[in-house]
Image (cartoon, rainbow, N blue to C red):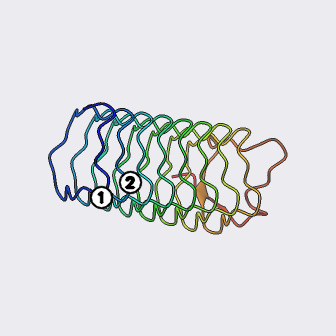
Protein backbone atom coordinates (compact mmCIF):
# COMPACT_ATOMS: atom_id res chain seq x y z
CA UNK A 1 0.00 0.00 0.00
CA UNK A 2 3.00 2.24 -0.45
CA UNK A 3 1.94 5.63 -1.80
CA UNK A 4 -1.75 4.96 -1.05
CA UNK A 5 -4.16 7.91 -0.90
CA UNK A 6 -6.02 7.69 2.42
CA UNK A 7 -6.79 11.39 2.80
CA UNK A 8 -9.37 11.87 5.55
CA UNK A 9 -9.63 8.13 6.24
CA UNK A 10 -11.35 7.12 9.49
CA UNK A 11 -9.25 4.33 10.98
CA UNK A 12 -10.10 4.71 14.67
CA UNK A 13 -8.60 1.85 16.69
CA UNK A 14 -7.50 0.02 13.55
CA UNK A 15 -4.97 -2.82 13.95
CA UNK A 16 -2.27 -1.82 11.48
CA UNK A 17 0.86 -3.34 13.04
CA UNK A 18 3.70 -3.76 10.55
CA UNK A 19 1.63 -2.19 7.73
CA UNK A 20 3.69 -0.68 4.90
CA UNK A 21 2.40 2.79 4.02
CA UNK A 22 5.62 4.47 2.86
CA UNK A 23 4.82 7.74 1.11
CA UNK A 24 1.09 7.33 1.79
CA UNK A 25 -1.19 10.36 1.91
CA UNK A 26 -2.93 10.32 5.31
CA UNK A 27 -3.65 14.05 5.48
CA UNK A 28 -6.45 14.73 8.01
CA UNK A 29 -6.79 10.98 8.69
CA UNK A 30 -8.38 9.89 11.97
CA UNK A 31 -6.09 7.26 13.47
CA UNK A 32 -7.15 7.80 17.07
CA UNK A 33 -6.19 4.72 19.11
CA UNK A 34 -4.81 2.91 16.04
CA UNK A 35 -2.21 0.22 16.61
CA UNK A 36 0.71 0.90 14.27
CA UNK A 37 3.45 -1.07 16.03
CA UNK A 38 6.49 -1.36 13.73
CA UNK A 39 4.51 0.21 10.87
CA UNK A 40 6.44 1.64 7.91
CA UNK A 41 5.29 5.23 7.37
CA UNK A 42 8.50 6.67 5.94
CA UNK A 43 7.81 9.83 3.91
CA UNK A 44 4.06 9.59 4.68
CA UNK A 45 1.99 12.77 4.68
CA UNK A 46 0.11 12.94 8.00
CA UNK A 47 -0.56 16.69 8.06
CA UNK A 48 -3.38 17.40 10.50
CA UNK A 49 -3.87 13.70 11.26
CA UNK A 50 -5.32 12.67 14.63
CA UNK A 51 -3.12 10.03 16.24
CA UNK A 52 -4.38 10.53 19.79
CA UNK A 53 -3.44 7.50 21.92
CA UNK A 54 -2.09 5.68 18.85
CA UNK A 55 0.48 2.96 19.50
CA UNK A 56 3.47 3.57 17.19
CA UNK A 57 6.11 1.62 19.11
CA UNK A 58 9.10 0.98 16.85
CA UNK A 59 7.35 2.57 13.84
CA UNK A 60 9.39 4.06 10.99
CA UNK A 61 8.31 7.63 10.24
CA UNK A 62 11.56 8.95 8.80
CA UNK A 63 11.00 12.03 6.62
CA UNK A 64 7.23 11.95 7.36
CA UNK A 65 5.24 15.18 7.46
CA UNK A 66 3.23 15.36 10.69
CA UNK A 67 2.77 19.14 10.68
CA UNK A 68 -0.16 20.15 12.91
CA UNK A 69 -0.89 16.53 13.75
CA UNK A 70 -2.37 15.51 17.10
CA UNK A 71 -0.39 12.89 18.98
CA UNK A 72 -1.82 13.33 22.49
CA UNK A 73 -0.69 10.43 24.70
CA UNK A 74 0.63 8.57 21.64
CA UNK A 75 3.22 5.84 22.20
CA UNK A 76 6.18 6.64 19.95
CA UNK A 77 8.71 4.73 22.03
CA UNK A 78 11.68 3.60 19.95
CA UNK A 79 10.08 5.06 16.79
CA UNK A 80 12.25 6.54 14.03
CA UNK A 81 11.11 10.11 13.33
CA UNK A 82 14.44 11.29 11.95
CA UNK A 83 14.22 14.16 9.45
CA UNK A 84 10.44 14.41 10.02
CA UNK A 85 8.33 17.57 10.15
CA UNK A 86 6.33 17.97 13.37
CA UNK A 87 5.83 21.72 13.16
CA UNK A 88 3.01 22.84 15.48
CA UNK A 89 2.22 19.19 16.33
CA UNK A 90 0.60 18.43 19.68
CA UNK A 91 2.58 15.71 21.46
CA UNK A 92 1.29 16.40 24.98
CA UNK A 93 1.90 13.38 27.25
CA UNK A 94 3.41 11.37 24.36
CA UNK A 95 5.87 8.59 25.14
CA UNK A 96 8.95 9.10 22.97
CA UNK A 97 11.32 7.07 25.14
CA UNK A 98 14.28 5.95 23.04
CA UNK A 99 12.87 7.58 19.88
CA UNK A 100 15.11 8.81 17.07
CA UNK A 101 14.23 12.48 16.53
CA UNK A 102 17.51 13.44 14.86
CA UNK A 103 17.20 16.42 12.50
CA UNK A 104 13.48 16.52 13.27
CA UNK A 105 11.66 19.85 12.96
CA UNK A 106 9.59 20.34 16.14
CA UNK A 107 9.29 24.12 15.85
CA UNK A 108 6.34 25.39 17.90
CA UNK A 109 5.35 21.82 18.80
CA UNK A 110 3.76 21.10 22.17
CA UNK A 111 5.61 18.36 24.04
CA UNK A 112 4.40 19.18 27.55
CA UNK A 113 4.52 16.30 30.05
CA UNK A 114 6.04 13.97 27.43
CA UNK A 115 8.84 11.48 27.84
CA UNK A 116 11.97 12.09 25.80
CA UNK A 117 14.00 9.82 28.08
CA UNK A 118 16.92 8.28 26.16
CA UNK A 119 15.68 9.92 22.93
CA UNK A 120 18.10 11.28 20.35
CA UNK A 121 17.31 14.86 19.36
CA UNK A 122 20.67 15.51 17.69
CA UNK A 123 20.30 18.65 15.52
CA UNK A 124 16.55 18.78 16.19
CA UNK A 125 14.79 22.11 15.70
CA UNK A 126 12.80 22.97 18.85
CA UNK A 127 12.36 26.71 18.32
CA UNK A 128 9.41 28.02 20.38
CA UNK A 129 8.48 24.45 21.37
CA UNK A 130 6.73 23.84 24.66
CA UNK A 131 8.40 21.19 26.80
CA UNK A 132 6.87 21.94 30.21
CA UNK A 133 7.49 19.10 32.68
CA UNK A 134 8.99 16.83 30.01
CA UNK A 135 11.34 13.99 31.00
CA UNK A 136 14.64 14.49 29.15
CA UNK A 137 16.81 12.22 31.29
CA UNK A 138 19.48 10.44 29.20
CA UNK A 139 18.37 12.41 26.10
CA UNK A 140 20.82 13.68 23.49
CA UNK A 141 20.22 17.29 22.48
CA UNK A 142 23.64 18.01 20.96
CA UNK A 143 23.35 20.73 18.28
CA UNK A 144 19.59 21.06 18.91
CA UNK A 145 18.12 24.50 18.34
CA UNK A 146 16.32 25.45 21.57
CA UNK A 147 15.73 29.12 20.72
CA UNK A 148 12.73 30.39 22.71
CA UNK A 149 11.76 26.83 23.75
CA UNK A 150 9.90 26.63 27.07
CA UNK A 151 11.93 24.24 29.22
CA UNK A 152 10.40 25.03 32.60
CA UNK A 153 10.26 21.90 34.73
CA UNK A 154 12.08 19.70 32.21
CA UNK A 155 13.78 16.90 34.13
CA UNK A 156 17.36 16.05 33.13
CA UNK A 157 20.32 14.19 34.61
CA UNK A 158 24.09 13.92 34.20
CA UNK A 159 23.64 11.79 31.07
CA UNK A 160 21.47 14.38 29.30
CA UNK A 161 23.64 16.08 26.69
CA UNK A 162 22.84 19.68 25.75
CA UNK A 163 24.07 21.98 22.96
CA UNK A 164 27.46 23.56 23.64
CA UNK A 165 27.16 26.46 26.07
CA UNK A 166 23.52 25.75 26.94
CA UNK A 167 22.60 26.06 30.63
CA UNK A 168 19.47 23.97 31.31
CA UNK A 169 19.03 25.32 34.85
CA UNK A 170 19.03 28.88 33.52
CA UNK A 171 16.27 27.84 31.08
CA UNK A 172 14.14 26.50 33.97
CA UNK A 173 14.99 22.80 33.67
CA UNK A 174 15.28 20.75 36.87
CA UNK A 175 18.12 18.35 37.67
CA UNK A 176 16.67 14.96 38.61
CA UNK A 177 19.20 12.19 39.17
CA UNK A 178 16.49 9.53 39.28
Q: Secondary structure at mark 1?
A: loop
Residue 135 at x, y percent in the picture: 52, 56
Q: Position of residue 67 (x, y in %)?
A: 51, 55
Task: State left or right for residue 43 relative to residue 163.
Answer: left
Location of residue 57 by image quarter = top left
The residue located at (77%, 57%) in the rendering is 147
Pointer 1 residue: 8
Q: Quadrant of the N terminus?
A: top left
Spatial CA span between label 2 and label 1: 6 Å
Residue matched to label 2: 27
Residue 126 vertical placement versus 129 (above, below): above
From the viewer's perspective, tell me whether residue 15 is left or right of residue 33.
left
Q: Seen in the image, is 11 located left or right of residue 8?
A: left
Occupied quadrant, residue 69 = bottom left
**Mark earlier in primary sequence (2, 1):** 1
As rendered, which of 8 and 93 lies closer to the eye? 8
Pick the front one: 41 or 128 = 41
At 40% across and 53% down in the image, what residue appears?
95
At label 2, counting other C-alpha atoms closer than 10 Å, the crowd grade (few under 14, some 14-19, many 20 or more) is many
Amino acid sequence: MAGANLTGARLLGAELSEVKLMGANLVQADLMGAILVKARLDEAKLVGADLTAAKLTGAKLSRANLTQSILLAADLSFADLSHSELICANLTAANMTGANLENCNLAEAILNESSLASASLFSAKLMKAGLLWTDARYATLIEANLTDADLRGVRYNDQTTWPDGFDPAEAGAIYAAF
